Amino acid sequence: MTYATQRTSVPVKVDEDKCIAQKGCTVCVDVCPLDVLAIDMVKGKAFMKYDECWYCLPCETDCPTGAVHVDIPYLLR
Amino acid sequence: MKTIEMETDVLVVGGGTAGPMAAVKAKEKNPKLKVMLLEKANVKRSGAISMGMDGLNNAVIDGHATPEQYTKEITVANDGIVNQKTVYAYASNSFKTIEQLDRWGVKFEKDETGDYAVRKVHHIGTYVLPMPEGHHMKKILYRQLKRARVEVVNRVVGTRILMDSEGKAAGLMGFDCRTGDFVVIRARAVILCCGAAGRLGLPTSGYLFGTYENPTNAGDGYAMAYHAGAELANLECFQINPLIKDYNGPACAYVTGPFGGYTANNRGERFIECDYWSGQMMWEFYQELQGGKGPVFLKLDHLAEETIADIETILHTNERPSRGRFHEGRGTNYRQKMIEMHISEIGFCSGHSASGVWVNERAETTVPGLYAAGDMASVPHNYMLGAFTYGWFAGENAATYVGESAIAAIDPAQIEAERARIAAPLGRTDGIPPSQLEYKLRRMANDYLQPPKVTRKMELGLERFGEIGEDIDHLTAADPHELMRAMEVQHIYDCALMATHASLFRQESRWGLYHYRVDYPERNDDEWFVHCHLRKTADGRMESIRRPVEPYILPLDEDEKTAYQRLRIVKQAATA
């Protein structure tokens, strides 16, 4: 079996200028109920790794620097 | 795949609403016990009240309501199929739970004299207590977990209950969704607080995670209890809710009703007397859509500016705060436009309907040492406050139980079998990704199980589910995260089968739209005034059985019996 890659516009956006993951912050990754966020170890920034969002907002609310913004997923908008 | 072994006295599975309460109360009951709270996400922000809650929907407060009256109303709202003892146990302890939450720092709305400001939403009684600042709920619970010294384990997904040789619950097996490690936890009592089965039907948006329930609540508790041999009750009484179309969150007539908001048809007219969620209410909602008077809306545009501003503040900061940006994207301002609603996908949830793992008034399931509380336990219409109250019962009773009961021998073969089942998707390089299997399974659940229920369709559904069941042996997972989805989809599969079996078994219609069977359109009290339970037989088959409805402790008056069957507004004929 072969697998196709499918591009997806993700609902969680991270402002890399504000994100302080490089300093060890993992708040958004920790609080996400669906565990869909991750830290890019090369860039030292948080990003949405899996498009499995409940648009519930803990990541945005709990981010200490206001770097995270959640849009309603495109299919629902 | 590494194996991590842990041990505790009381294991609570699920750190949402009922779980933290159960853990704290078990510890308070016996501080010497080790109490572990296991959570597949992080207890700081997990479960149905991840972002808090805007109010209590079933507060039984002296001066506004009595436990007797509440129990009778829920009996009627659930078409009589109720173990009144369980509802009465909730209602009698409801106020105690409110006082506990109040002491912990939860802010409830009070009037100028300091009394709780209770509002009327139900058909008969007055039970809704707003919590305009309810977004702090999870923080408050977390503080209590720390104070009680409960051991918290995050990001571990439970997949099966560990059983001893005498058929008692003896712990849990699962895995870490970050590392992929196999986890075995031995415990002397297990309390399941895993929430609803909210990922059963597919939302009409087609987005797998655009569900009404927090999608982490995939029916794990239902499936684990089933495989442990516990009986499940009233599964055919589906959860189907009236929600904001596409956004799939509650439009919130409970919040807006007391301010003057109401459910309206496309002419802006009221068509139901009461916005409280019941099968009958959903039936009228469905009729309105079928009769060409849809869409159905939540109407607020007639309210005064300051009222709407208050409503916005409550609804856009609690429970599902992202609804504000959803409305903004579609240009829906409550001042000018009604909020378009629709009928949700199906699920199991006792918090709103009655489909759950059977429990008695002590939160005990039919398996010794196994307790359940919250949305997944069978106490009907229990909502958040019922989850807290039954979590409390479960914690205290489990703490007492472990003092009296010892674990018998554990057959290591069950551990090895579960390790192999969990390891399988990670070991396959070729096969079906969980997201595709889940999409197909849930689409079929919509096609064949969404009411009105048709016998022939449900039989075909079983055929399709059977084929999908064979695909489970080909599931792949690229990493531990995807493994979580691969194991969840197997819980969803179990729930789909249970939903079909339970719906085919009850050959009558009851609970309005929740169990409307086209082939048996009438309610038949002579044959079906019973609970229908479902369980796994010793040889692994799914079996449905009838259980008599326990004798009422609070008999209903004649005029109460039909209160929820008269929800449609009857227009007076115009006089000439």
Image (cartoon, coloured by chain):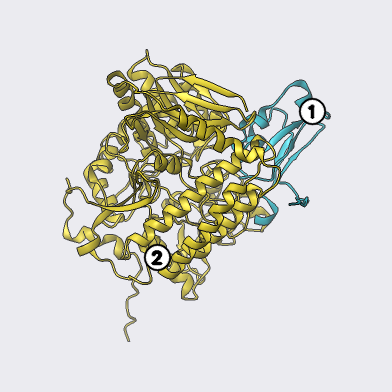
On the image, which quarter does residue B228 sit in?
Answer: top left
Q: Determine the colour of chain B.
A: yellow
- Vertical comparison of B573 with B503: above or below: below
Residue sitting at 47 percent across and 73 percent down? B290
Count of numbered circles on the image: 2
x, y percent for residue B97? 34, 31
Which chain is represented by cyan in the image?
A: A
* Separation of marks 1 and 2 at Cα, in angstroms: 52 Å
Most foreground residue, B362 or B330: B362
Q: Is residue B48 left or right of residue B189?
A: right
Q: Which part of the image, by quadrant, shows the N terminus of chain B?
A: top right
Q: Residues within 10 Å of mark 2 (few under 14, many from 20)?
A: many
Instruction: Using the image as rendered, state which of residue B214 and residue B100 is in the foreground.
Output: B214
Dot 1 and dot 2 within a common chain: no
Residue B278 visible to an observer of this rendering: no
Q: Residues within 10 Å of mark 1 (few under 14, many from 20)?
A: few
**Chain on which label 2 sits:** B
Residue B373 drawn at (x, y percent): 38, 37
Residue type indicated by callout 2: Trp
Q: Residue at x 51, y 50 (%)?
A: B493
Chain ID for label 1? Answer: A
- Can residue B488 be seen here? The reply is yes
Q: What residue is drawn where x is 39% and y is 20%?
A: B9
- Of B277 and B20, nearer the camera is B20
In this view, which residue lies farthest toward the bottom? Answer: B576
How far from the left and from the top, in percent, is residue B360?
27, 39
Element at badge 1?
A: loop
Q: Residue B283: give its label.
A: 2
The mark found on residue B573 in the picture is none
Q: Which residue is mark 1?
A: A41
Secondary element at image label 2:
helix
